[in-house]
Image: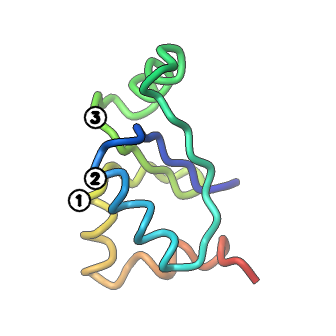
């Protein structure tokens, strides 16, 4: 199980989401989809969404950047990230 985030390099929402995950001290697997149509299709099939970022914490599809920050505002993000903290 891992944290996965589908991104593009210039997406400001992707950058914000990665910045929050970095600040939380977790490692994540970034999957860039801007030049990989197969990975973009994979992302769309998994998430049923077409926008980046799309974020998974383990098996939980968090959604996008706004969804990630909503978890943070509601004090729910830390408990989801706890198993993934870099020691």
Task: Return the residue at label 2.
Answer: 13
Name the residue: 33% across, 42% down.
10
Quadrant position of the N terminus in the picture: bottom right
In the picture, residue 62 is in which quadrant?
Answer: bottom left
In the image: residue 4, left or right of residue 62:
right
Dot 3 or dot 2, earlier in sequence: 2
Give residue 66's position: percent from left, percent from top.
23, 59
Mark pair 2, 1: CA separation: 8 Å
Q: Which mark is residue 51?
A: 3
In the picture, residue 26 is in which quadrant?
Answer: bottom right
Mark pair 1, 3: CA separation: 12 Å
Residue that extends furthest to the right in the rendered view of this protein = 87
Task: Return the residue at label 1.
Answer: 66
Q: Nearer the viewer, residue 78 or 31?
A: 31
In the image: residue 34, left or right of residue 38:
left
Q: Are marks 3 and 2 in contact (CB under 8 Å)?
A: yes
Name the residue: 44% across, 50% down.
55
Mark pair 3, 2: CA separation: 10 Å
Name the residue: 52% across, 71% down.
22
> In the figure, 53 relative to 28: above or below?
above
Name the residue: 55% across, 73% down.
81
Q: Are marks 2 and 1 in contact (CB under 8 Å)?
A: yes
Q: How is the image coloured?
A: rainbow
Badge 1 crowding class, 10 Å Cα cut-off, few under 14, some 14 to 19, many 20 or more, is some
Q: Nearer the viewer, residue 52 or 44?
A: 52
Quadrant position of the C terminus in the picture: bottom right
Residue that extends furthest to the front in the rendered view of this protein = 10
Disc 1 is placed on an element classified as helix
Give residue 77's position: percent from left, percent from top.
42, 75
Disc 2 is placed on an element classified as helix
């Amino acid at each position: 199980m891992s944290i996965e985030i589908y991104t593009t390099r210039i997406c400001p929402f992707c950058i914000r989401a990665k910045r929050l995950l970095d600040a939380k001290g977790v490692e994540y697997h970034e999957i860039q989809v801007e030049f990989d149509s197969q990975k973009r299709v994979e992302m769309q099939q998994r998430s049923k969404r077409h926008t980046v970022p799309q974020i998974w914490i383990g098996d939980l599809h968090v959604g996008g950047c706004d969804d990630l920050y909503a978890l943070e505002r509601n004090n729910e993000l830390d408990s989801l990230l706890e198993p993934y903290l870099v020691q």
